[in-house]
Image (tube, helix red, strand yellow):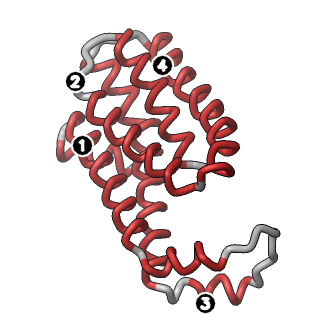
Amino acid sequence: PIGGFLAEYLGYRSVFHVTGASIVMGFLIAFASKGLKQLHERVNKEPTHIPLRSAINGLRNHGLLATCVASLSRMIIMQGVISTVFPIYLHEFLKIGVGLIGVILGVRAVSICLATVGCGHLSDKIGRKPVIFAGIIIESFCLYLYTLADSFEPMLFLAFVEGLGAGMISV
């Protein structure tokens, strides 16, 4: 929905730039948050159950709240871009057929699944921050490269790589 609104007023290519910038902005907010660094230091290795009241009180932490809002915004914008703007962009501007658009989106979905599984194990070994950081960089860069690609083959490759980045972010 937001992606369609942005496409209407900014143009299709600008949507990818705005989305990439919002992803980077969300990362910078999360990276600079002192509250998250303190939370990371207090994390136990054993799973714990957090009462709902404690979780709601945790939102008083401005760094955590900003991170949640940035993450939700990124998720909503990306959903709008990928489900509405991206297929229209591929069809109307690049003249890619509907069947091949399905292939591109399918390859992206498969790469998200592969990255989520593989990077889950990797993040257990090296930590979540480096994996998420790499995913944000990959996804943002691919969103920019979408605007430069001009045919099916580069789009297919970029969708695969961008899906890997999206899967890394979701760990």
Q: Secondary structure at mark 3?
A: helix
Furthest-left residue in view? 10
Task: Please state the horizontal and vertical placement of residue 29, each as a whole percent of the image.
Answer: 36, 68
Q: Which residue occupies the foreground of this view, 15 or 158?
A: 158
Q: Is disc 4 placed on a helix, strand or loop?
A: helix
Query: Which mark is first along the chain, 2 or 1?
Result: 1
Quadrant of the rendered image containing residue 11: top left
For label 2, the residue is: 148
Check disc 1: other Cα within 10 Å, few if <14, some if 14-19, many if 20+: some
Secondary structure at numbered mark 1 = helix
Query: Which of these two is toward me, 121 or 138?
Result: 121
Disc 2: CA contacts within 10 A as few (<14), some (14-19) or many (>=20): few
- Identify residue type, mark 1: His
**Residue at x 42% of width, y 60% of height:** 73
* Horizontal and vertical percent position of residue 4: 33, 43
Residue 106, image x, y percentages: 57, 22
Amino acid type, residue under disc 3 in the picture: Asn
In whole angstroms, how far apart are the C-alphas of marks 3 and 2? Answer: 45 Å
Name the kind of residue labelled 2 in the image: Leu
Q: Secondary structure at mark 2?
A: loop
Q: Is residue 19 above or below residue 69?
A: above
Task: Say left or right for 159 vs 42.
Answer: left
- Identify the mark nearer the N-term, 3 or 1: 1
Measured in 3D between alpha carbons, the distance from the residue under mark 1 to the one under mark 4, in whole angstroms, is 20 Å
> Label 4, on which residue?
104
Relative to 105, say whether 27 is above or below. below
Residue drawn at x 31%, y 60% is 25
Circle 3 is placed at which residue position?
Answer: 57
Q: Position of residue 150 (x, y in %)?
A: 25, 15
Q: Amino acid at mark 4?
A: Ile
The residue labelled by disc 1 is 17
